[in-house]
Amino acid sequence: MHGLRAIVAKELADHFSSYRFVILFALIAMVSLITVYIVGLNIREQLAEVAKPKLVFLMLFTSAGGFFSLVDFVAFFGPLIGLIMGFDAINRERNEGTLSKLLAQPIYRDDIINAKFISGIILVAVVLVSIVAVITGLGLITMGVIPGVEEIARIAIYLLVSVVYIAFWLGVAMLFSILFRSVATSALAGIALWICFSFFISLGAGAVAKALTPEAGQDKPEAMLRRAKIQQSLSLTSPMQLYAGASATIIDPMRRTTRSLVQMGMMEQISLARFSAPLALSQSILVVVPYLISLGAITLICFAVSYTVFMRQEIRSL
Amino acid sequence: MDTFAVIHARGLSKVYNGQVAVEALDLEIAEGEIFGFLGPNGAGKTTTILMLLGMTEPSAGTVTVLGMDPCRNPIAVKREVGYLQENMGFYSDMTGWQMLAYIADLNGLNPRAAYGPMVEAFRDVGLAGEEDKKISAYSRGMRQRLGIAEILLKQPRIAILDEPTLGLDPEATNRIMDLIGRICTQRRMTVLLSSHQLHQVQRICTRVGIMIKGKMVACGPMDQLAREKLGIGQERYSLEEIYMKYFTEV
């Protein structure tokens, strides 16, 4: 155990004192400050038509201020935090010759990757929690709205989901840092995968669904529904979609479903809008859990692959 | 054997992707001995060392280190064995003191208990006063001495030094070798020293082994090897002559 604790302590110290972390933190803080400022300015207008506003505080995180909301921002650029924290975790030590030094000490080999993963997660959690805390504090000042228990619970769950999501990307980055000897290669591989998951999968899912249901049109609701279903399940292969599905329901309770397309008529929509009420917290959690489990599962798969590869590597080639 | 063999290998072999790196190696090192491990580059010395530490698994044969099997019990072996690898790396933005503190931490020494041994290790390798400099500002010789300090800190029963003088100038080489000879006799450590500095090895080692192309071609006290190979009187031989003789024969 002392090996794991020692490496976690050292890695954390390294992270916190690195310029990389300072730059990252400055960037994220800047974005969240701008977001909360713009949201604070606009929120009055947004609430103007709403008769009985509910869970106003959460709008700080979901309402798109200038360009995007904080939730969107984390979904898109959160992966970069994970990648930046992990892309050189193992191969830098290997290139500098410190890996074999570590392995010559009386510690288990898996302690090294476990510790790097744990310290990365701690760091990600610190970054996210502090950003959300800053936004909450600024929200209190600018809006003068006090969050209720439910809102705080929702924010906490949102944080948990986000940490798991970024942990997945940390796992990916560490896997690449074990597979590739060159730091630049592993960084590029991580970014390539990020671009693929973030942009191509959602584009590709639309194209494939269109190709599979050529008969769909305004007069064929079943085919439209089938197209939407295919697109939905294809895009769920991307962790970003999983995360978006999970975080949207928890932080934006006015959304009743994670599906993009719900068939309903004009009159139904109007009558539903009259009774629009937030989804209860317990129900939101029920919606979130499958997404959270899928995210956790792919993170674990990623970590397990890194683990087996690392444990089997010959020291001579380290 | 009258003294206890702390390192004991029998028929040790290692095959890497069909290439034989070490072939049927027999090795016994007695407690308190300074054993010179010689051989050209790529002869399999480092592979042998890694097998002794349990850092790579032998393809055949058995090893015991201090009566333990390094493959089954690598942690216990590494606790008792200090290893200075060739081309060792340092975290260059740490200070010497931080580096040593990290090693102490990895070995399960708490900071309070490690303080005394750390000061002592810095003093013994002649780095007292340099503790708070960053390792990136250390010269090569200083880094090498820091590596030795890392080993001393662990107070191991065996020290395995893989080319500790690689890339050093003659003066620094002399200092490192003197240091190794002096400290090891002082602290009664068993040393396995792999090196190409034949003069220095001859000066401090009690016994040598010569490894060529994965095989141990000679192993024993230097005068015995000299008598066998050169057939001249004890005072006149040099290890270099013996080494070259074996080398040209293979």
Image (tube, rainbow, N blue to C red):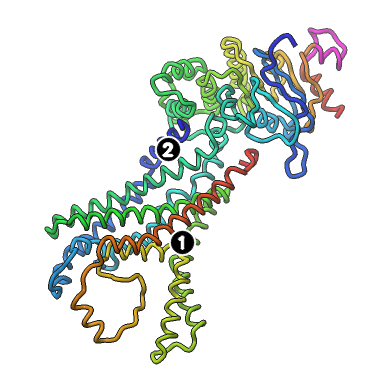
When the figure is inspected, residue A163 is found, relative to residue B163, above or below; the finding is below
**Label 2 sits on residue:** A8
Magenta stretch contains residue B107: no
Examine the residues drawn in magenta and state their main secondary structure.
loop
Do badges 1 and 2 share one subunit? yes
Q: Are marks 1 and 2 in contact (CB under 8 Å)?
A: no
When the figure is inspected, residue A296 is found, relative to residue A97, above or below; the finding is below
Say few, some or many: other residues with alpha carbon within 10 Å of mark 1 (under 14 / 14 to 19 / 20 or more).
many
**Label 1 sits on residue:** A194
**Left or right, A78 with reference to A305:** left
| Image-quadrant location for residue B72 | top right
Looking at the picture, which amino acid does disc 1 mark? Answer: Trp
* Quadrant (top left/top right/bottom left/bottom right) for the C terminus of chain B: top right
- Distance of label 1 from label 2 (alpha carbons): 26 Å
Looking at the picture, which amino acid does disc 2 mark? Answer: Val
Instruction: Identify the residue at image location x=65%, y=31%.
Output: B50
Where residue B1 appears, as percent x and y from the top left, is 75, 11
When the figure is inspected, residue A159 is found, relative to residue A223, above or below; the finding is above
Q: Chain of mark 2?
A: A
Instruction: Identify the residue at image location x=73%, y=36%.
Output: B59
| Image-quadrant location for residue B68 | top right
Find numbered disc 2 in the image and state the secondary structure of the residue it sits on: helix
Q: Which residues are magenta?
A: B224-238
